[in-house]
């Protein structure tokens, strides 16, 4: 008789953002007169940079001609894009990453979820708490998480609480962890990490022969000079870290889909190259990202592309400033929003995360993300994103501050 992967049965019936979408849809049907302002899911709203669109249009025309048509591309990505990434994102920052250490994919979500394929099921996993749900859920699916304990999380996962008391930064765990997920600038809290703090994690991983899975999807939002844009700016990281990057938030590719993962050739555990393992996994399970999209991603690194991307990033950062300063001026606790498009606020009046979600939607029509959806330590907090228009952002903060008292 056919057997299913029973680990999937341990998960909640639906993904966090599906639950939110269902709640909002139901509310909209019941209250069609209410204007909904969505500041929950981290989806961009500004259009693709013109340089990207132009490059994709040209590439699409090439695909319509016999002489320039392309079929299957290299699974790891076309050399022109990997070379552009290596030069602009790493070598210009003094980081010696080569193009054959870069694997182009359809998203950082896909890669952070799939990277576990190359690791044994018995590895001990450590995550920040709160944390992006994909890290935990995919390890549950793989069988690394153990059993869920109400109020305590998964039995085999090491949780690293990120609270106000420690500046929402995780502390080095007392016990040994094999696989450690880090995300900076952080989703959901919006805080960044300095070089000295990140060096501690690299040193820990080197001592324990652990791997750091470093999600740097929001590095383009960093404004603090002390914060590294890549973990590979930290000494020794090339021997203990894998980095995930995305064009989604950087250049508006949420609907276009393009990202990349960096696995240095120096990452060798028990004589096995992780670079080669991931290459084998990718060549088996995917056929790469389309030529048209990769030409668009390449254009992000043109002079025009860089200027247009920077304009979009500054637009969202200004929205984040409006959110944070507006909330703080009204007496709310608010964090992040300086090196990140996310603002992490304390739910007012002792409300739980979901209680505040429901009340906020009912009273203001504003949609955010309940902090408890990111983990136990997120309870009582709430995430707002800067990925909307300035007009809607200002309107949303006005509604919140007028409807609630901090």
Image (spheres, rainbow, N blue to C red):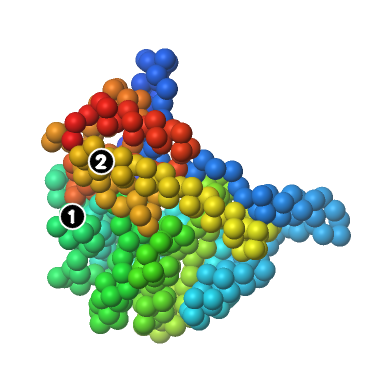
Q: Which residue is mark 2?
A: 329
Residue 385 percent across, percent down from the top left: 38, 43
Label 2 – label 1 distance at C-alpha? 22 Å
Q: Please determine whether, in this image, residue 239 is positioned above or below residue 211.
A: below
Residue 276 percent across, percent down from the top left: 50, 75
Residue at image position (37%, 42%) is 322
Residue at image position (63%, 58%) is 305
Residue at image position (27%, 32%) is 401
Q: Secondary structure at mark 2?
A: helix
- Residue 11 seen in the figure: no
Q: Secondary structure at mark 1?
A: loop
Q: Which mark is residue 163?
A: 1
Q: Counting residues from the N terminus, which is met first, the one under dot 2 or under dot 1?
A: 1
Residue 151 percent across, percent down from the top left: 14, 46
Mark 1 packing: few (<14 Cα in 10 Å), some, or many (20+)? some
Q: Which of label 2 and label 1 is nearer to you? A: 2
Q: Please determine whether, in this image, residue 389 is positioned above or below residue 201.
A: above
């Amino acid at each position: 008789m056919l057997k299913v992967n029973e680990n999937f049965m341990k998960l909640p019936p639906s993904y966090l953002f599906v639950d939110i979408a269902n709640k909002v849809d139901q509310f909209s049907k019941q209250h069609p007169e209410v204007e909904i302002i969505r500041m929950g899911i981290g989806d961009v709203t500004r259009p693709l940079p013109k340089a990207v669109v132009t490059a994709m249009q040209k590439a699409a025309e090439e695909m319509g001609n016999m002489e320039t048509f392309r079929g299957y591309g290299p699974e790891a990505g076309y050399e022109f894009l990997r070379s552009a990434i290596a030069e602009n994102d790493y070598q210009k920052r003094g980081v010696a990453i080569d193009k054959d250490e870069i694997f182009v994919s359809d998203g950082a979500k896909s890669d952070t979820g799939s990277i576990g394929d190359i690791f044994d099921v018995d590895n001990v996993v450590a995550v920040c708490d709160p944390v992006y749900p994909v890290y935990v859920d995919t390890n549950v699916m793989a069988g690394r998480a153990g059993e869920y304990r109400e109020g305590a999380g998964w039995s085999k996962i090491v949780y690293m609480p990120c609270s106000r008391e420690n500046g929402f930064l995780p502390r080095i765990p007392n016990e040994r962890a094999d696989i450690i997920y880090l995300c900076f600038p952080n989703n959901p809290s919006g805080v960044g990490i300095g070089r000295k703090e990140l060096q501690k994690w690299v040193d820990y991983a080197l001592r324990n022969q652990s791997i750091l899975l470093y999600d740097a999807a929001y590095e383009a939002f960093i404004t603090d000079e002390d914060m590294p844009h890549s973990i590979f700016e930290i000494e020794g990281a090339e021997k203990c870290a894998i980095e995930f990057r995305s064009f989604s938030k950087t250049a508006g590719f949420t609907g276009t889909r393009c990202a990349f993962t960096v696995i240095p050739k120096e990452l060798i555990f028990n004589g096995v190259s992780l670079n080669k393992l991931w290459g084998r996994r990718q060549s088996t399970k995917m056929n790469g990202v389309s030529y048209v999209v990769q030409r668009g991603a390449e254009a992000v690194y043109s002079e025009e592309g860089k200027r247009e991307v920077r304009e979009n990033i500054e637009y969202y950062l200004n929205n984040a400033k409006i959110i944070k300063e507006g909330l703080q001026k009204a007496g709310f606790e608010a964090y992040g929003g300086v090196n990140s498009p996310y603002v992490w606020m304390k739910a007012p009046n002792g409300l739980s995360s979901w209680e505040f979600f429901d009340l906020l939607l009912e009273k203001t029509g504003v949609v955010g993300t309940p902090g408890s959806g990111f983990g136990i330590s997120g309870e009582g907090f709430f995430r707002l994103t800067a990925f909307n228009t300035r007009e809607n952002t200002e309107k949303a903060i006005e509604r919140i501050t007028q409807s609630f008292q901090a």
